[in-house]
Image (cartoon, rainbow, N blue to C red):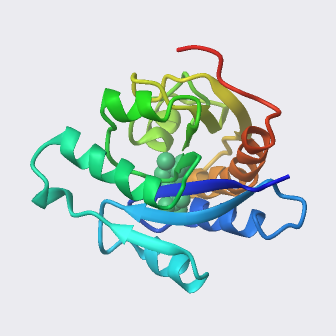
Amino acid sequence: MSLKRVGILISGRGSNMSALIEATKRPDYPAEIVGVLSNRAAAPGLDLAAAEGIATTSLAQSKIPSQDMFDDMMTQVLESWGVEIVCLAGFMRILGPDFVARWSGRLINIHPSLLPAYKGLHTHERALADGANVHGCTVHFVTPGLDEGPAILQAQVPVLPGDTPDTLAARVLVEEHRLYPEALRMLASGEIRQLTF
Ligand code: GRF
């Protein structure tokens, strides 16, 4: 079976990206990472990817006036790498509807909450403020609504007495690094697919 060609979009440290790269080193893994694209040139994840011999590109959004133009440039880069599946991994930019439609069913994201709870930012702070007993993360297909697409996998962690946003985020992150490679494996192998949105 040929390996599915995966592009990863990042904005920052890239720990989920690294977890995906590590997973692709398993001999039975059905995907390879062919490129990493960042909307921030200073994203530390770019250096991590380059050190693994993976193609990297950054697009400076401040120099590209329109959302559509930026999204089209991203698609051009991804197509130049022959990408079949796009993984968002800490990509801090909302994607336009044309980009989402272009990659529909082949575009997935990891979000640090048990969706549909806590869409958007500051999920750990909000879970703590609510007094939640459980928290976690979700890998989901991306659809036009923010953090609204169908879930592929979720993982729960307990919220413990004395937790701060940082301690809770660290506990969730361990699960993110386990969950994302498994969800990508399921999509790349054809075990799952998105039916509609
Ligand atoms: C992760 O918590 C992810 O769930 C969220 O942004 C964070 C990115 O972290 N979307 P990293 O860049 O993967 O380390």
Q: Is residue 119 left or right of residue 171?
A: left
Residue 82: image quadrant is: bottom right
The residue that appears at 60% across and 55% down in the rendered structure is: 6
Q: Is residue 37 left or right of residue 150?
A: left
Q: Position of residue 104 (x, y in %)?
A: 51, 29
The residue that appears at 39% across and 24% down in the rendered structure is: 144
The residue that appears at 85% across and 67% down in the rendered structure is: 26
Q: Position of residue 133 (x, y in %)?
A: 67, 31
Residue 68: image quadrant is: top left
Q: Nearer the viewer, residue 46 or 172?
A: 46
Would residue 27 be visible to someone looking at this image?
yes
Q: Nearer the viewer, residue 10 or 78?
A: 78
Q: Nearer the viewer, residue 155 or 68?
A: 68
Would residue 165 be visible to someone looking at this image?
no
The residue that appears at 57% across and 36% down in the rendered structure is: 113
Report the residue that reaches farthest toward the right.
Answer: 28
Q: Position of residue 41 (x, y in %)?
A: 29, 72
Report the residue that reaches farthest toward the top.
Answer: 196
Q: Position of residue 81 (x, y in %)?
A: 50, 61
Q: Nearer the viewer, residue 92 or 71?
A: 71
